[in-house]
Image: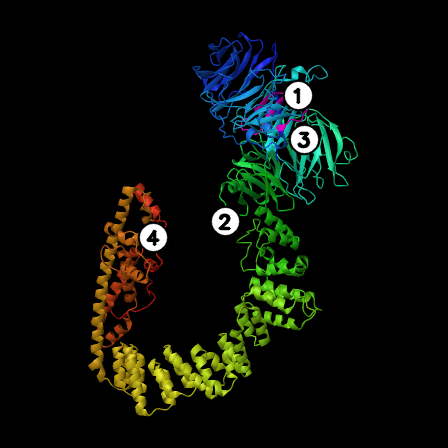
Amino acid sequence: MRNLSLLQRFKCVDLSFPGSPQCFTIRSETGTVLVASEYTLIYGVVVAIQDLPDQESVCVATGSGDVILYNLSTSQLECVGSVESGLTGMTWSPDQELVTLTTGQETIIMMTKDFEPITEVEINQDDFGEDKFITVGWGKKETQFHGSEGKQAAHSNTLSQEVQPALPWDDRKPRITWRGDGQFFAVSVVCPQTGARKVRIWNRECVLQATSEVVNGLGQPLCWKPSGSLITSTQRHPNKHSVVFMEKNGLLHGDFTLPFGKEQVKVKELLWNSDSTVLAVWMEDLKPGENDHPNTYIQLWTVGNYHWYLKQSVHFGSEPLRAPACVCWDPEKPLRLHLLTRGWASYTYDWGWSTERSHGTDCHDNANVAVIDGDKILVTTFRQCVIPPPMCAFELQLPVPVNLVTFRSQAQRTNELAALTADGHIYVYGQGESRNLKRDSNITLFRISHLHFLYSGGGVENGGVPGVSDVPVDGFVISLCHSLRNGTVALQLDDGQIRKLSLTEWKDSTGNTINLPRPCVQTALCTLSGEEHLIGLTERSHLYIGDSLVASNISSFVVYDDFLLLTTHSHMCHCLNLSTLSIKGLQSALSSDANQNDETVRKVERGSRIVSVVPQDTRLILQMPRGNLETIHHQALVLAQLRKWLDSLRFKDAFECMRKLRINLNLIYDHNPTVFLANIEMFLKKIDSINYINLFLTELKEEDTTTTMYPCPSHSVSSSASGKGGKKVDIICDALRSTMETLDPQKSVPRYCLCILTSHVRKTTPELEIALQKVHELRGESRSSVSAEEALKYLLFLVNVNELYEHSLGTYDFDLVLMVAEKSQKDPKEYLPFLNMLKTLEPNYQRYTIDKHLKRYRKALHHLSECGEEHFTELLNLVKDQRLYSDALELYSSNSEQYKTLSVAYAEHLVEQQQAEQAGLLLWRCGENARALQAFVSCTSWRNALAVATHIPLPPEQLTLLARDLAEKLLEARRHTQAALCLEQYAKDCEEAISALIQGAAWEEALRLIYLYNRQDIIETDLKSALLDAHSNQTSFLESQKALFIRHKNRLTVVRELKAKARLELFDEDGPDCADAELYSEASSVMTGSHLGSKYSRSNSRISSRSSKNRRKAEGKKQSLKEGSPFEDIALLNTLTQIIIIVDKMRVHSLLKALVLFQFDRAASSLQRDYGELLQLVETALPEIWTDNLQQGQTPLTGPNSTANSIMASFQQQRPAVPQNDTEALTAPKMRIAVKWKLSILK
């Protein structure tokens, strides 16, 4: 639905030579025109001229038979060949490798580009060609049924077609045209036998392929469509004049009729442009005009959906000097036409594709698009309907062909349009009272190339003519555009300069002049980040905003409201919000790939172009290359419109749009939860549909769609915080239900009954019992709009029938259960016996049975407890089976026998769960003291055990035995102080108590008891020897730990050096980009230890963790201290950490005091000295073992001794990849520095 708009028409040169031009050629590289006149230095008439850029020459063919080559560099003239019979035409192949010449003897001479002859053949041949049709007689006249004429008609010649001679104005010269790929060429020539024109098709080797069928009235023009297989010519019919198309086999394939009478014009030439989109028809009147000279026309035709449109009609009048003498398309720019008049004036016409659409942004605009089709304007109103071309909503018939059409750029009047016709008249159309378009005025102007409908006021509507004022412009204006929002009119000049209507320069906010780098075929004004910009699209698909290149693959664009919509050659459609983006943001958005939830991008069909956007709607109209239309709803447009509707509380419009386009309905709430909750009543009244409300409720989910599915680009009010606690679905369901219940307070059953049921079911924890109860209440309502059966049927649609049956059973209402069961697929034999059995039971036991069947054991326990003592055994079994001990204890008083029985059962369960102490507490409080004592003894809870034994009370002998038994268990658990307490206070055995304290190294407590019970003899017999043994053990332990520490520390240093060396060697061999370089990306040798060992152990670095056995094996290897293992450094660090922790926690202070007390000063001094030296050694080694790069990351190693590989290795180590289980080994252990353990009295 595009039109051809004239960008510029400029006069290139105005020469004054004798005679008239015969032919010309275009030099694209230099932009010059080479013309041959009838008065030339060369003898004879010039029949053809061709520029040869590769040879820097011009080839000229004369009617006398000479082929002249003129070198443009040296200005030398050379005759490269001559034909005695003369030449009638010369045509070069598209690749300029071959040249074909037609001679006066009606032959074709084919030569190479070096003018070496290839072949010469006769044009008129009796043979059809190599592609001659093969037929078996089907469809022949002899085989057809002729009805009442009889069989004799099969052999009569009445059906034979009479061949008519060529048209009277035919110049009878041969015409040659090449296909775009240079593989075939066609020749149109007058047949000597019949006098009619025929077209013959030849291949590149000059072998005849096919001959056209008999076409009466075939004209002289001939042109092969460059990108297709159609050959174009003209045909005179008895009642019309047509442009016809032939296939490569010579058969006719389609046509279109020229808008002239049958005897009005003759077609001089047909010319296809280089991309095969426009066909130029050069015509001339057959009858002279007022000054005895014919009128001349050039029409531009395009095709879409198999319909031919007349897009431009250029009238040159009847003045002889203004009539075209030569016409041709530019070989490089497809929409540039060159024309040379008989008066030696050269003109260049530049056209561009444009879509004429209305500019409105409100709901009054009908999204009109106007398509020019000769003297008709085809208007389609996309707001009402989408009609594929060539059809339309309505047509505007004008008296002469239309060249330009535009819509009014004024608010609420954008449906009005103005049309510029080929004779220079402007016709303005507006909407009348009857809503039919009418012609309002007729304004006569001439030499108009651009038209924009801007004026306002009532002059035109009253039949007047608006005032005309001239504003001189320094340059050629190739486009103009108007902003409906700001009222700005921008002009684009041919050199890219931008001017406002006041002819002031376009400047940015900093005062710099802004110009377009290249001329643009389409321009539009937009506001970007608060500043007005001009957007331009060049014919090379470059999109500019001012002087900045935004993208280079844009096929079409349109500015709508705050959005820039554009399609790309990569088959994507972008919809960008200009209010939130800068120029750099646009460049980034168009150059980057879209993520999954990017609403600004969507895929479209290959070659799609934007036709129009329906204002205040979500529809975007695209046209495919073949001409058909498609309507899409771009998600960015949809969401922007939905947000506007939701902000203005137009819930119904938003809901229907979301439902139709499958937008998640959660957006209605998520867009602004506070506003939605405050306007729930309005939401219900505007939606006004039970089905719609139910649909909304069923789609609710906890996800916030404004942050996941539809992120808001402006980050405005969208927030899921509703201001209330709780879950989103529950909040909405409760709010809607409460509002629906209050809308009809007079009715016992509200109108929104089904919606209320949905609100109960859709909650996070479905309230099925309440919903079922409401259904049950409907059974007694005769005036309800919804019956109980309908409500139940709807409920079954939302909930699984079996689940609903179970919940109905849980209401203990058998009528409701039967009602649900009848609607299910259950066999009555399945549920009726069970229900009948339940009806025979006592109410509490009945409910217990139902709850147990539904596995609601806590409710079952409660109902069973109310059934009496005769069911207590069953209750106890239920408690044991389902472990409901705590719940059962709450149902009985603490003084009851049932409570005691349940407590004993609970205690037995706790003993099985290895919780004997808690079991003992339960037994003790319910009076089972003996069993409580047993439980306490089993778990060595000695204080509780002795307290229960005293409470029983036990005889002294048994209490003593109990104390000794507990002390023995405590000693086994190395709880010496607690064992000594039992022996001293309950067993009355002070000697055993002191022995236990000495055994546990509790020297001070042992001395207290020794002197308390006056047993100083134990000092000599046991205490001193124990002190010396402890000193010896501690000294030996310190020596062993010191040796281990030094050995592991030294080995760790060696391992680190080896790994650092291996790492640098690998970088020296392969460089940092080798395949194994990633193995060295850890922060230290420890970090690389899990990936890199020695060369013979690297295969162990990929340890499978597919099973727990393999995982345990891998962990075991990490603790291995075997030399050369890949995890040796980690194992060494773990071992050193354990040594430091053990040494730091040694209890030396109490031993030193005891040694000093009994005058073992030398032993105490040696122990203090050895322990201090070991601590000093550890503190000194800590920074060496746990370096800073282990904990904070290693800085790059630079300096005079560093190499490129070593620096690269240090950089690679900046990315730590440490397993989580190894992080503890990388942290230095903390020592208890503040603990004072030394004795100052020792040296």
- How far is mark 4 from mark 2, CA to CA? 40 Å
Q: Position of residue 557 (x, y in %)?
A: 58, 38
Magenta residues (range): 256-285
Three-letter amino acid code at the position of disc 4: Asn
Q: Which residue is mark 3?
A: 451
Contact check, label 4 and label 2, Cβ < 8 Å: no
Q: Position of residue 1218 (x, y in %)?
A: 35, 55
Q: Determine if residue 1180 is in view.
A: no
Q: Position of residue 1109 (x, y in %)?
A: 30, 62
Which of disc 1 and disc 3 is earlier in sequence?
Answer: 1
Between disc 1 and disc 4, the foreground one is 1
Q: Which residue is mark 2?
A: 596
In this picture, residue 764 sits left or right of residue 962: right
Between disc 1 and disc 2, the foreground one is 1
Seen as rendered, the residue at the extreme bottom is: 955
Within-10-Å neighbours for mark 4: few <14, some 14–19, many 20+: some
In this picture, residue 36 sits left or right of residue 679: left
- How far is mark 1 from mark 2, CA to CA? 60 Å
Three-letter amino acid code at the position of disc 3: Leu
Numbered label attached to residue 1081: none
Contact check, label 3 and label 4, Cβ < 8 Å: no
Q: Which residue is mark 4?
A: 1189
Q: Position of residue 342 (x, y in %)?
A: 63, 15
What is the secondary structure assignment of the residue under circle 3?
loop
